[in-house]
């Protein structure tokens, strides 16, 4: 077991990041998830980090009822590997466009989060039948 102490902050797109304390908690490269959750951590639980400004700002964001704006799927970049499939199949394009915005966003974020092109291709190919059936990425 590794020893470390971490604080997870949500809605960090609405917070300042003094001294660069906050690091992305997700490797997602597309959409608002990459900007909404960050963490501050240290290897020693005895180390005191200046988290008070961040935690105070986080409390103020919650008290004010502020929300992180979710990106519309049209604002997200469509991975090239998926765009090729959409261009090749009007049926797939129609099926994808008929999905709810949240389902579209989930697919785009999942496809874009792969670092290697072959992984993106594999993900796209795996989920084409789901999209054609009108299912979201987590639907069975």
Image (cartoon, rainbow, N blue to C red):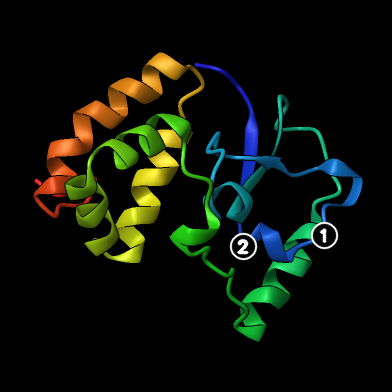
The first of marks 1 and 2 along the sequence is 2
Percent position (x, y) of residue 52?
A: 82, 58
Mark number, residue 16 = 1
x then y, percent, for residue 127: 21, 36
Q: Classify mark 1: helix, strand or loop.
A: loop
Which label number is shown at residue 35?
A: none
Query: Would you say 115 lies left or right of 107 here?
Result: right
Residue carrying label 2? 11
Task: Out of 85 and 78, give the one closest to the viewer.
Answer: 85
Q: Which of 36 and 127 is in front in this view?
A: 127
Residue 71 spot, x, y in % from top left: 53, 63
Whether residue 95 is visible to the viewer of this picture, yes or no, is yes
Of residue 22 and residue 111, the one placed in the foreground of this image is: 111
**Quadrant of the rendered structure where residue 69 is?**
bottom right
In the picture, measured across the screen, residue 55 lies left or right of residue 17, that is left
Q: How far apart are marks 1 and 2 (CA)?
A: 11 Å
Callout 2: 10 Å neighbours few (<14), some, many (20+)? some
Please identify the residue farthest to the right as the structure is shown: 19
């Amino acid at each position: 077991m590794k020893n470390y102490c971490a604080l997870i902050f949500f809605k960090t797109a609405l917070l300042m990041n003094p001294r660069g304390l906050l690091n992305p908690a997700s490797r997602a490269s597309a959409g608002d998830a990459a900007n909404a959750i960050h963490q501050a951590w240290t290897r020693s639980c005895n180390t005191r980090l200046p988290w008070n400004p961040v935690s105070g700002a986080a409390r103020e964001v919650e008290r004010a009822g502020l929300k992180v704006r979710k990106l519309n799927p049209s604002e997200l970049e469509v991975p090239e590997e998926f765009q090729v499939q959409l261009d090749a199949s009007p049926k797939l394009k129609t099926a994808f466009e008929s999905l709810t915005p949240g389902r579209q966003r989930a697919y785009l974020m999942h496809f874009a989060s792969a670092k290697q092109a072959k992984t993106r291709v594999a993900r796209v190919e795996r989920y084409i039948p789901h999209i054609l059936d009108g299912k979201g990425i987590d639907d069975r």
